[in-house]
Image (tube, helix red, strand yellow):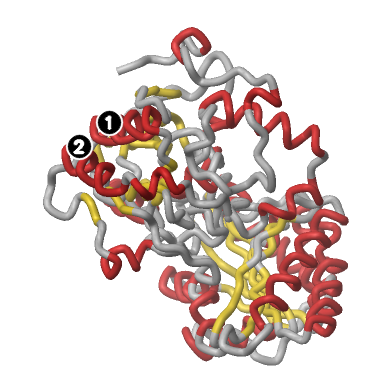
Amino acid sequence: MPEPDQSTLARRKDIIAAMRNIVPADGGVIVDEDQLRPYECDGLMAYRQLPMIVVLPENTGQVAAILKYCHIHKIRVVPRGAGTGLSGGALPMADAITIGMMKFNRVLDIDWDNRAVVVQPGVTNLGITRAVEHKGFYYAPDPSSQIACSIGGNIAENSGGVHSLKYGLTTNNVLGVEMVTIEGEVLRVGGKGLDQSGYDLLGVITGSEGLLGIVTEVTVRILRKPETARALLLGFNSSEAGGDCVAKIIADGIIPGGLEMMDAPAIKATEDFVHAGYPLDVEALLLVELDGPKVEVDYLIEQVGAIATQCGAVYSRISESEEERLLFWSGRKNAFPAIGRISPDYMCMDGTIPRRRLAEVLTGMQVLSQRHGLRVANVFHAGDGNLHPLIMFDANQPGDLERAEAFGADILKLCVEVGGVLSGEHGIGVEKRDLMPEMFTEDDMKHQERLKLAFDEDELLNPGKVFPTLHGCGELKTLHARGVADKFPNIPRF
């Protein structure tokens, strides 16, 4: 991480006073060490750092005032949502203000005619569905942490979930955002319309990991709940056979609502924890959900069953009720905490590969497991090739964390080697930052940095994340964010 700026630390009292003038609410500015401790890391708990201070704004005006002050006084800023991220994207800095957005927790508008919901970024992912489910609607992206993760954090990382194969990631379900730049300007990008003219700035913002600005309002699309949804459990004697079945289902033109896979260690840990009825005598388990009109679902279940038989399935079970379908999914949704019950620590990786290389990569992971001397359990979005290997280790054992990091790096390198990418939905953060050259050339990264510096020329927003080395705007001869109105004249300002 960048070295702390000593001049900023020397001004800490003045900065605290300024923040209390902007956010006067009791508890709006956190400065005591014990109260700062909950903010020292996100879901990647291997890396920790106390923030200089934490500020909890309550409205867009306060966010704009904070960022304007930080821009004028050259103070670093780390945006933070619910803290459930798994790549260290919200890791604080000793000389930075951490801006927590969880007081932005209201549903602002439900537009049934346009099938759109406007929310503040602190609303949880599941909270959106709960706000609309009484009329038969839901919000499609559903990360495993959906009960806790915020929609603002979902935008930062472009989160997915078990239903992303058919219904898309966050980027496919967000219609518009309100965002504050580091200079304190409030921009509105997109809206309730299906398509927006001009540059795809919404696509740039989604997945930008807090490097471009802070989102203060979000408009998402909602979908009508399918008429019928049923799930199948399919067991195989090898991960290779399970991976082959995944490829053949997609090749046959079938796009399930969800298509997940678990290997034997994950199956056992999950069943012991949730008691979802998973078979314990198989090496790989597919969880396939088919949704739509009843006649279509019944037909597709037969098709998938036939494909599974061709691929050597040794176990098959179809949900016969909504309760049973949800029970099947409860196992998958609780796989991560299930692994936490059998290992003192674990590191959840996140790489994406072509589906046809699935069996090869799973075999390669077992080789790497033996090489590094650490166990790995696999539970992942098989339909779109988004892997989530869970590396088990004990941080209290000297060298274990370093071995887990090396193991994880080798897994991600393997993903890139077979034509995949470093992240599917967790983001780069600090976890994968130093692996960026494995995927991108120096020129590739410089072009990405130019975009970053166009919004944040002084590199104040979430520094130390994503880019191994950040070049100055002079070196890159980039367009910077001063005079944003001249560069983006079509973006409404408030």
Judging depth in this view, the residue of 251 and 398 nearest the camera is 398
* Residue in view at x 76 percent, y 58 percent: 249
* Residue in view at x 35 percent, y 51 percent: 129
Q: Secondary structure at mark 1?
A: helix
Judging depth in this view, the residue of 299 and 164 nearest the camera is 164
- Which amino acid, by three-letter code, is at mark 1? Ala
- Whichever of labels 1 and 2 marks the residue nearer the N terminus, that label is 2
Q: Residues within 10 Å of mark 2 (few under 14, many from 20)?
A: many
Q: CA distance from mark 1 to mark 2?
A: 7 Å
Instruction: Tell me if 304 is positioned left or right of 240 in this view.
Output: left
* Residue in view at x 56 percent, y 42 percent: 207
Judging depth in this view, the residue of 436 and 223 nearest the camera is 436
Instruction: Tell me if residue 269 comes above or below residue 257 in the rendering.
Output: below
Instruction: Tell me if label 1 and label 2 are in contact, CB under 8 Å.
Output: yes
* Residue in view at x 42 percent, y 50 percent: 95
Task: Locate the C terminus by quadrant.
Answer: top left
Q: Which mark is residue 22?
A: 2
Q: Secondary structure at mark 2?
A: helix
- Tell me residue 353's x, y (percent): 77, 55
Task: Locate the N terminus by quadrant.
Answer: bottom right
- Which amino acid, by three-letter code, is at mark 2? Ile
Q: Which mark is residue 65?
A: 1
